[in-house]
Image: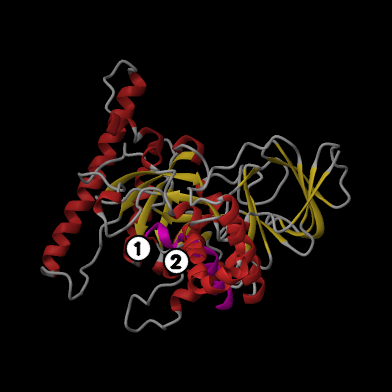
Amino acid sequence: MQRITTLPLDSYTTNLGFFPMLTRRFILITFVYSLLTSQVFSAVPEVPGAKQDHPIALTGGIIHTVSGKTISGGVLLFVDGKIVAIGQDLDLPEDVEVIDVKGKYIFPGLIDANSNMGLVEINAVRSTKDERETGNFNPNVKAHVAINPDSEIIPTTRSNGVLLCLTAPSGGVISGQSAVIQLDGWTYEDLTIRPGAGLHVNWPLMAAVSDWQLTGSAKDAANTRDKDMKQLEEFFNTARRYDAARTNNPAVKIDLKWEAMREVLAGKIPVIANAENANQIQAAVAFSVRQKVKLIISGGYDAIYCTDLLKKHDIPVILGGVYRTPRRTDDFYDLPYEIPSLLEKAGVRFCIASDGRFGASMVRNLPFHAGTAHAYGLSMDVALRSITLSTAEILGVDHQVGSLEKGKDATLVITDGNILDIRTQVEAAFIQGRRVDLSDRHKKLHYKYDQRINRRAVEQAVK
């Protein structure tokens, strides 16, 4: 027996703020009446979605697969959290729930590759920050075990279509290992889909920088650079000696710090170097060649000046946001917006991330970074790919997420327009086939103060 569902899919608390004023007031009055008579509503945290227990088919929507053609009026069927068929006029199981999404758009869940999601709640409150350890070399630090699944930032982020993130530690020279997480679940184990996504290295400045905030001479800066580079090189060399000792004699005493480096040296975990300047990028590439490790550049403002080098060694770039100011006084004001299109033309592999300087609370703006890049020359298809499949490929999870394909996770969003458009609203989301609650603190605050404004009308209606 097929069950038929139509949009809007979510509860009252999902999309009220976006109805026209008269419609919103009518719904508000009706809802508050039920509130006063039955006390059905309470401001509780969002509950993780229940495991998919029956087939679900989304029918009639515009399906943006990212990896292939866009299908208009198509059908997307998923079972047990996996996509099993995409196309038109599919044979559906008898017990399928059919959700009519005619006129809506279906996209894979967006992926951000530069965040501290779940590690920091309020940047100005030290007790809510758990993103760094003491010391300069911490390869054994694993971000995923410190994630707070109850973070208020997680619901506000997925409300805008961002369903997956790379969450990374910070501080020191080697900060630790990041993880790719999905933004729904009871525990950090539920959230984590790849625990060792990358080893994060804050690449030393390779030249003196003039800035009013900095003190010390150019000579001091050069000495610091040389010291940091020597320590970094020696750290990897020591890790290599430890790896050789463990390989030759498994009985060698285990040291967790060096043990964490073994997968990096084996090429299973890439080094993600936080590098903005051209000389930093060049130095990081040279280091990766010497040490024979996989490298990803994060930040990458000057990547456009290193395209030949990056292409030669097939090194991808995680662009640290489009909404940022030029780094130099003689840069064009819109250069940060054009960097993605310049990398596309040069043939460098890249993805677009949010600006990590502002923390997890800004990850929700990820689609607008890609939208602005499109406005400044990046093709629409590549702009969408830069926050979905390209990101998944760079982070090594493209076999599971990043596009809508048979066999991949049913991690997707349903919208009323192009997801790169700031006017578009996300109407529903699924993570591994689980229905995601799209209510969040922002919406609850809107309802609260909207009621204050309309209280007189509500009271009159109740009478």
Q: Residue at x 46, y 37 (%)?
A: 187
Residue 360: x and y in percent read: 41, 57
State which region is magenta: 358-378
Mark 1 vs mark 2, CA separation in Å: 9 Å
The secondary structure making up most of the magenta span is helix
Which label's residue is closer to the chain start, 1 or 2?
A: 2
Q: Is residue 67 visible?
A: yes
| Image colouring | secondary structure
Label 1 neighbour load within 10 Å: few <14, some 14-19, many 20+: few
Residue closer to the observer: 222 or 29: 29
Q: Which residue is mark 2?
A: 321
Please tell me the numbered disc located at residue 40.
none
Circles 1 and 2 in contact, beta carbons < 8 Å: yes
Residue 206: x and y in percent read: 25, 62
Residue closer to the observer: 52 or 292: 52
Local SS, label 1: helix
Residue 419: x and y in percent read: 62, 65
Q: Is residue 419 visible?
A: no
- Residue 300 falls in which quadrant of the image? bottom left
Q: Quadrant of the C terminus?
A: bottom right
Please tell me the numbered disc located at residue 357.
1
Amino acid type, mark 2: Gly
Point out the residue furthest to the top here. Answer: 251
Q: With respect to residue 411, does 307 lie above or below? A: below
Q: Residue at x 34, y 66 (%)?
A: 277
Label 2 neighbour load within 10 Å: few <14, some 14-19, many 20+: many
Residue 367: x and y in percent read: 55, 65
